[in-house]
Amino acid sequence: MLLSLNKEIGNRKTELEEIMRHLIDPLDFSVEEIDSLLKLADDIAQNPKKYQSVCAHKKLATLFYEPSTRTRLSFEAAMLNLGGSVLGFSSADSSSASKGESIADTIRVISGYADIAAMRHPKEGAPLRAARYSTIPVINAGDGGHQHPTQTLTDLMTIRRRKGRLCDLTIGLCGDLKFGRTVHSLIKSLSRYNNIRFVLISPEELRVPEYIISEVLAPKGIEFEQVTSLESAMPKLDILYMTRVQRERFFNEEDYIRLKDTYILNADKMQLAKQDMAVLHPLPRVNEITLEVDDDPRAAYFEQAQNGVYVRMALIMTLLGLVQEDKN
Ligand code: NCD
């Protein structure tokens, strides 16, 4: 009896795992799936009314163990725009994590309260662990210095809208490439498109982690260079992706202070760039882009933050299986 019950539970779990999708790593969706999702996000941006009741009676749980403005609020705005509701917490202190509850227990419980969950956590791999115990789709909203796949969807939508393509591009990534999880996810994702070249602009100490080179760039033979000068890289770039030095991931404050203002993009540096280059930044900005650049038509970062709502709407619909097949 016990054996057959176990078998039944085992089978049910396998079936659930088969039909339920999570977004933990930027490569969890194929290029074709990303393409459909970005098309859906474009349609949502153009026809928001069409989608205002798609998630009626559905609930999104936002489980944020680390600070956030854009990611959490754009997830919440996304679910509200779809006619759904949101519940959650915005810091580890206000959750039972402060009492020592495990991720596995928390997500098991939340699975009974909500239909989908977005999780941000300072520990790398925490959302993956949650997904293993969850009976609802889990979205990685940033895990430590590791990955940030929904920021990547936002970045891809912005690049596609600005440049009309995701292939044949030279992309400069500038700043904290070591700890910047948005950078890691964007490199992973863009590496799947044709004729992509990366210019990795950082101080020696903040270069991309070795695995990005050995597991992502090298196996695919993707062209890249690691440089320290932003000025000399500027003229060749189609996209410049600026990032903040990730103070919270530094071991000591002195190193942070020494490195924090290495790159400051200003109007003078923008003069070195192509007329149709686009400047992206996942935000928050600290000092990396001066305010005068905001008025340059090439500044795309506020539109990028807005696109975050559309891609998250498209993602929630996709993971909840609420996307209608295109009949054309
Ligand atoms: C980024 C993050 O949290 O990794 N912010 C965001 O989600 N838009 C970038 C950062 O904090 O520097």
Image (tube, helix red, strand yellow):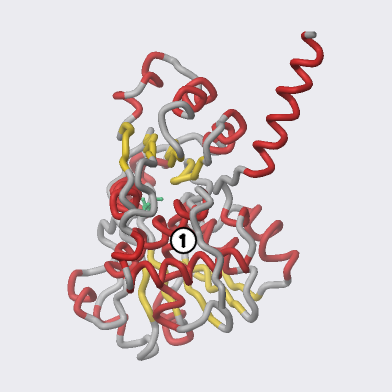
- The quadrant of the rendering that contains the C terminus is bottom right
Residue at 46 percent across and 67 percent down: it is 40
Compared with 236, 180 (above or below) is above
Extreme residue toward the front, this view: 327
- The quadrant of the rendering that contains the N terminus is top right
Observer-nearest residue: 216 or 75? 75
Label 1 sits on a secondary structure element that is loop
Residue at 53 percent across and 73 percent down: it is 199
Observer-nearest residue: 140 or 13? 13
Q: Position of residue 3 (x, y in %)?
A: 81, 12
The quadrant holding residue 169 is bottom right
Count all numbered tags in the image, as a single digit.
1
Disc 1: which residue: 203
Residue at 72 percent across and 65 percent down: it is 218
Residue at 35 percent across and 91 percent down: it is 275
Q: Position of residue 288 (x, y in %)?
A: 30, 63
Compared with 192, 208 (above or below) is above
Q: Is residue 70 visible?
A: no
Q: Position of residue 188 (x, y in %)?
A: 60, 61
Other-residue count near label 1 (Cα within 10 Å), few / some / many at <14 / 14–19 / ≥20: some
Q: Given the image, on which type of amino acid does mark 1 rest?
A: Pro
Observer-nearest residue: 188 or 150? 150
Residue 10 shown left or right of residue 313 in the figure: right
Q: Is residue 310 visible?
A: yes
Extreme residue toward the bottom, this view: 275
